[in-house]
Image (spheres, rainbow, N blue to C red):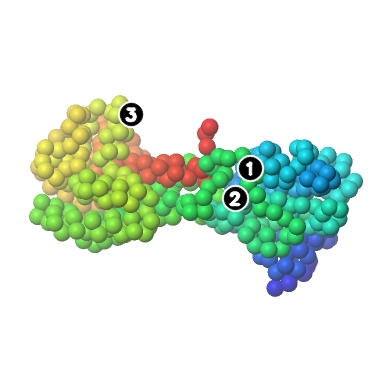
Amino acid sequence: MKKNYTDFHHLLATGETDLPDGVKKIIDFFTANNLWFNLSRNVKALGCKEAANKRNRLGHTGIPLEHELKSFFGKFINAAGNEQYVIFHCKAHQELDHDKIKRALRAMKEVNKLSNEELKNVFHLGYGLVNPFTLNPLFSDPPILQVFDKSLSINIIPPYTMMTNAGDLTWAIEFKPKELLDAVKHYRIEDIVTYTSANNRSAEQKRPKIGILTGNNPESGIALWQKINHIIREKRREHFYGDISFPHVIVESIPDMGLSMELDLREKETWEAVNKGIISLCNQGATIVCIACNTTQYFTAKIHDITSQYQSRFISIPEVTFDYLVKNNIKEFAFLGIKYVTDLNGKWSAFKKLREFKIETLPEESIAKIHELAFKVKQEGITGPGITKLRDLLNRETQSKTVVIALTELSILLGTQKERSREGRTYIDTLELLAEAVADEYLRLTQDLYPETRGD
C-alpha cells in the first residue's frame, strides 16, 4: 500500500512542519518498490555504534549492533583502468576485509574512502547519511556499484530486520534486508568481511531453546521460567531489547510427574513420564534441558544419555547445587526436602555427592511435616497458612545458619518472601540455582548472536 508523506507527520518534532528531503526520498524508494518499512526518530547519531544505541524499535531504545547497517562509500580503479564509485554494505559489528574487496572487484589498487568534502560536494551527503536506497547508480559512468556482504541475508535474531539512517541523522528506517536486493540496481553480493564465528554464521545456525519439564508441581516450572527470564533481563542490562531478548522456551507439563512423590512405589511410571517429557523437549529442538523438580533428578544418568543423542545439554539440580556450595565455601547446612531427596544414604536421592559436607540431620517428624506441606501447596497453591508453616519449618525445625531448600513447593513459598536472610540465617533455593545455571548457559550460547555483550 502506497504511503504518503503525511502518514509520517506524527513523527515531526515540535517546530517541524515537513519531512526532510532525504526522508521523502526514502519513502519514495520503498513505496515505489512495494517494500515493507518502518520509520522512526532518534537522537542525532553519526557512527554505527552510536546509532545502534539510539535507534528506537518495538518500544525499546537501542538495537543489537548486528542489526545496524554499515555503509562504506569509496572509489577504486577497476579492471578496465577506470575510476569507479562503490558502496559496501555489511552488518555494523563486522569489519571489511580490504584484501577480499580488492579480489572481488578485480581492483587495480585498494579502494579509497570518499572524503567528507567529496561526499558533500558531489553527492550532497555527509558522514552518517550513506545508505543503499536513494543514490542513482547511473549518476556516474561507469555506474555506482553497490556490494552487499553475503551475511546480510542471514538474520536469526528477532525481529529479523535491520536499521539505518533514513536520509537524516535523526530519522531511521527499519527494513527487511532480504527484500531490499529485489529493488536495488547495479549490485553484487560478495564475501567482503573479516571472518569470525560471530559475523559469518551459517544459515542453518539456530538460536538456542530452553526446554523445561515440569508437573511436580506445574507451578514449579512456571516459577523456574520466571526466574530464568529475570536473570537474563538483569544480566543483559543495556543489551536487553524487551520481549525479543527473552529465550525461546518449550514447557512440557506432565501431570504424571507427581507420581515421584512416592518414587519408591512408582519408579517405573515416574520414569515413563520423565522419559516421555525429555524426548518431547529434544524433538522440539530444546538445546538446554532442565527439570523443575528435585526428586526426579534421580534419573540424571538416563536423562544425560537421551539428551546427548540430540546434542542437547541437560543441566541437573544436584550438579549445580554442589558447584555452588563449593564455589562459595559453604561447608555445613540444613538440607530440606522430601525423604527421597534428603536421605543421602538411601537409593533415591540424586544429591549423594553432598555427603562431602556437614549436613544437619532432621528428625523423622520434621521430614513428615515437610512432606505434608508439599502436598498442601500442591492442593491449595500459595496460601497464608502455607507460608506460616514454611516459616515455622525454617525457624523451629532447623538450627543451621545456612538452609538449602530442595523442594520446589517450598521454593514457591519462599519466592513470596522478600528477605532471604533473617536473623543471621541464609536460605539457598536449588530452583534458583538451576535458573542461574540455565540462564548462564543460554547467554553463553547466544554470545555470538549478540557480540556486543561479550566481556572480551
Q: Which residue is mark 2?
A: 151
Q: Residue, x 69% and y 42% (percent of image)? A: 103
Work out which quarter of the rendered image holds the N terminus and state it.
Answer: bottom right
Q: Which residue is mark 3?
A: 328
**Residue 161 visible at all:** yes
Q: At label 1, which amino acid type do we have? A: Val
Q: At label 2, which amino acid type do we have? A: Ser
Tag 1 near tag 3, CB within 8 Å: no
Q: Earlier in the sequence, mark 1 or mark 3?
A: 1
Q: Earlier in the sequence, mark 3 or mark 2?
A: 2
* Label 3 to label 2: alpha-carbon separation: 43 Å
Of residue 90 and residue 19, the one placed in the foreground of this image is: 90
The percent position of residue 429, horizontal first and vertical second, equals 30, 41
Q: Dot 1 lies on which element?
A: loop
Q: Earlier in the sequence, mark 2 or mark 1?
A: 2
Which image quadrant for residue 173? bottom right
Q: Dot 3 lies on which element?
A: loop
Q: Residue, x 37% and y 59% (percent of image)? A: 284
Count neighbours of disc 1 (C-alpha within 10 A) and say few if under 14, some if 14 to 19, many if 20 or more: many
The percent position of residue 362, horizontal first and vertical second, equals 14, 38
Q: Residue, x 52% and y 53% (percent of image)? A: 203
Relative vertical location of residue 377 with respect to residue 397 in this rendering, above or below: below
Q: Residue furthest right?
A: 121
Q: Which mark is residue 193?
A: 1
**Seen in the image, is 229 located left or right of residue 135?**
left
Tag 2 near tag 1, CB within 8 Å: yes
Task: Indicate which label's residue lies in the foreground, 3 or 2.
Answer: 2
Q: Dot 2 lies on which element?
A: helix
Q: Residue, x 66% and y 53% (percent of image)? A: 189
The percent position of residue 412, horizontal first and vertical second, equals 30, 50
The percent position of residue 49, horizontal first and vertical second, equals 66, 41
